[in-house]
Amino acid sequence: MQFEKYPFEKLNELLKGIQPNEEFAPLTLTIGEPQFETPKCIQDELCNNVHLLNKYPKTAGEEELHEAVRGFVQKRFNVSLKPEQLILTFGTREVLFNFPQFLLATKEAPVMAFTNPFYQIYEGAAIASGAKVFYLDLTEQNGFKPQIDDRLRLADLVIINSPNNPTAAVMDMEELKRWVEAALEYDFVLINDECYSEIYTDVPPPSLLEASQAVGNESFENILVVNSISKRSSAPGLRSGFIAGDEKILQGYKRYRAYVGCASPLPLQKAAMKAWSDEAHVVHFRDAYRKNFKIAKEILGIDAPEATFYLWLKVEDDLEFTKKAYKEYNIKVLPGSFLGRNGIGKGFVRIALVYDEAKTKEALDRLKACLQND
């Protein structure tokens, strides 16, 4: 198998040999990793259950964690899931990589489609599955939202991502409903990667599960979503996520997972129960990101996106801008061309506003100077 270099490896190669301006302290805005401290209540729950490390965790996870996650889905999306309609996962990266391999293993000539630019695990999964790929290009012309067309008749698996990484675009309920209808009409499995669903500025983004119910697909036939607490709770190290939806598909995937060996340790599950069950800390983090976008508006004149903590900033040349920002202002951003294929993403940089207000202001002041001197 021949996998593409990861975007961060490409970034290191791009910046190799460049001496950054030492007048500035280094700032990294490349990775979607919250830089806020994980809430104390979650840390305490982890520490209080360290003694459970002497036990093997079940692949299926503890029932209390199942209940906490289903409770989150009910409260947030007004969707009542049966136990068979949800599988706990070790974050979402592993499920986005191994689920396509499970689903496509028996297909003679599997076909995947996913948004472009994209989270590179989608591409890795396609390569590992031996799948042919076609891209759902996200451009300024389509509002950075995937479009439905007749190519989808050929697809076995389609991955969309709303709220979107890296563009920060959000599909509304009507758009998601059309995607559910397409999955049923063309008979492909549709996954929405909803990892940024809880980091929103004003209106809570809808879930594909809600859209499925809204069009009468109560059993979620062909419909799945993935989500995690990494962004929601500033706890990426807990690796707590889920995949939910079509129980006929999940029944076989649950058995497959028994062989994968990615059960979450019990102390982590206990801490995750606390995270999924508590909403107060999530409100706090949303407010912090909202303040960061207010700073971005004041400094760069950019309107806040509906969700995520990213700016998808248009520049003349994303590679040259990235090198200049590092060399002259000691700040790292991620070129959009590293996140897309066939020229999609070129001319944009992704900026992750994951720091506190003071560091965010400093970073954006430097970026403004870089833009003015570009």
Image: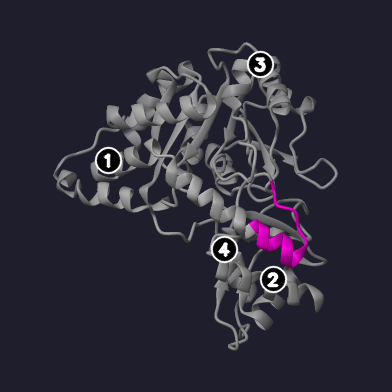
Three-letter code, disc 2: Thr
Mark 1–mark 4 distance (CA, rounded to whole Å): 32 Å
Q: Is residue 294 magenta?
A: yes
- Residue under numbered circle 4: 8
The residue drawn where x is 56% and y is 70% is 358
The residue drawn where x is 41% and y is 59% is 37
Q: Earlier in the sequence, mark 2 or mark 4?
A: 4
The residue drawn where x is 68% and y is 41% is 115
The residue drawn where x is 66% and y is 14% is 215
Q: Earlier in the sequence, mark 1 or mark 2?
A: 1
Mark 3–mark 1 distance (CA, rounded to whole Å): 37 Å
Tell me the quarter of the picture where residue 196 sits.
top right
Tell me the quarter of the picture where residue 197 sits.
top right
- Give yes or no for contact between labels 1 and 4 (Cβ–Cβ under 8 Å): no
Q: Earlier in the sequence, mark 3 or mark 4?
A: 4
Residue 142 shown left or right of residue 15 in the figure = right
Q: Position of residue 17 (x, y in %)?
A: 61, 83
Mark 3–mark 4 distance (CA, rounded to whole Å): 37 Å
Q: Earlier in the sequence, mark 1 or mark 4?
A: 4
Q: Residue furthest bottom?
A: 23
Residue 38 shown left or right of residue 154 in the figure = left
Q: Earlier in the sequence, mark 3 or mark 1?
A: 3
Q: Position of residue 252 (x, y in %)?
A: 41, 21
- Crowding near the residue tagged with mark 3, few <14, some 14–19, many ≥20 C-alpha atoms within 10 Å: some
Three-letter code, disc 3: Leu
| Visible residue check, residue 188 | yes
Camera-side residue of 276 and 160: 276
Q: Position of residue 295 (x, y in %)?
A: 66, 63
Q: Which residues are magenta?
A: 293-305
- Residue under numbered circle 2: 322
- Residue under numbered circle 1: 270
